[in-house]
Amino acid sequence: MSHPIPNFSIDLSGQTALVTGASAGLGLRFAKVLAAAGAKVALAARRLERLEEIAGEIRATGGVARAFQVDVTDADQLIGLVGEAEAALGPVTILVNNAGIPDAQRATKMPLELIDRVLDVNLRAPYILSCEVARRLIDLKLPGRIINMSSAAAYDYGGNGAALYSITKAGVVRMTEALAVEWGKFHINVNAIAPGAFASEMMDGMLERLGDITQKFPRKRLGDPAQLDSTLLFLASPSSEFVTGTCVRVDDAQHNR
């Protein structure tokens, strides 16, 4: 087999990417980056008006994007979302499971409703979406890329009242590893990204609750979402063809505090 030198490309022309949690934070950045690399992008979240604004911004720069309102705790909506995105933009060949919520409470004080919601959003929804996307790709005999958003908290629980969040994000890593094995023969790569502390709406709430946590970090700073672009594009692109079942930690050595 002959490969170009260097064997590297982030051209996503002809691909359709579905991004959950695309109305703000990392998901918004991911959607714009994938569109800039040539992918048609399906933006999914609860805030339809906000999604429509973002889709308009992408189209204004020459990209292709559509907005889809979804509650990721509703399995029927998740399955329907994949079909709607496919009908509008073509088969989903890149899935970014980005939607997630924190718990921000001690384990013994969490109401059952919050426990269920954190599990549903952070773990159940990515699993259901991944399976639906993979099923369709297998039927169509198409390769694909699934990128799950984990967290540095999957490896390092700081004890600040987010135990279930940490547990679900560790579950995302194991889900990534297991599904990569099951779908490898179908050329569906499944990988994860575990960001450290990055500027986002979720992080704003944590800083309000805990104070300036950056002073404990080696470089005393939060990440900028733009610093995840390269990892996202590598895992979404043909360049990562031999990479599956891994979780890339992007945390600025924050775990070494």
Image: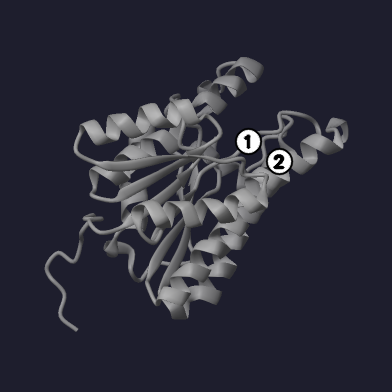
Mark 2: few, some, or many residues within 10 Å (few <14, many ≥20)? some
- For marks 2 and 1, the one nearer the N-term is 1
Residue at image mark 1: 101
Q: Which residue is drawn at 56% across and 27% down?
A: 202
Residue 192 visible in the shown view: no
The N terminus is located in which quarter? bottom left
Query: Going by the picture, which residue comes out furthest to the bottom?
Result: 1
Q: Mark 1 falls on what kind of element?
A: loop
Q: In screen coordinates, is 238 left or right of 168? A: left
Rendered position, 9 above or below 20: below
Residue 98: x, y in percent? 51, 44
Q: Mark 2 points at which residue?
A: 118
Q: Where is residue 95 in the image (x, y as percent from the top left)?
A: 45, 55
Residue at image coords 62%, 47%:
154
- Type of amino acid under label 2: Val
Q: Position of residue 207 (x, y in %)?
A: 58, 19
Residue situated in front as seen by the camera: 44 or 106: 44
Please, is residue 233 above or below residue 239 in the view? above
Above or below: residue 48 compared with residue 118: above
Residue 61 quadrant: top left
User: What's the residue at 37%, 72% (across, down)?
Assistant: 142
Q: In which quarter of the image is the C terminus?
A: top right
- Hey, what amino acid is under mark 1? Ile
Residue 31: mark: none
Q: What element carries label 2?
A: helix
Q: Can residue 251 be seen in this view?
A: yes
> Which of the 4 quarters of the picture holds residue 178?
bottom right
How far apart in space, not on screen, are marks 2 and 1 (Cα)? 6 Å
Label 1: few (<14), some (14–19) or many (≥20) C-alpha neighbours in 10 Å? some
Using residue 42 as the reference point, say whether residue 245 is left or right of it.
right
Circles 2 and 1, Cβ within 8 Å, touching? The answer is yes
Q: Is 253 displayed left or right of 89 in the figure?
A: right
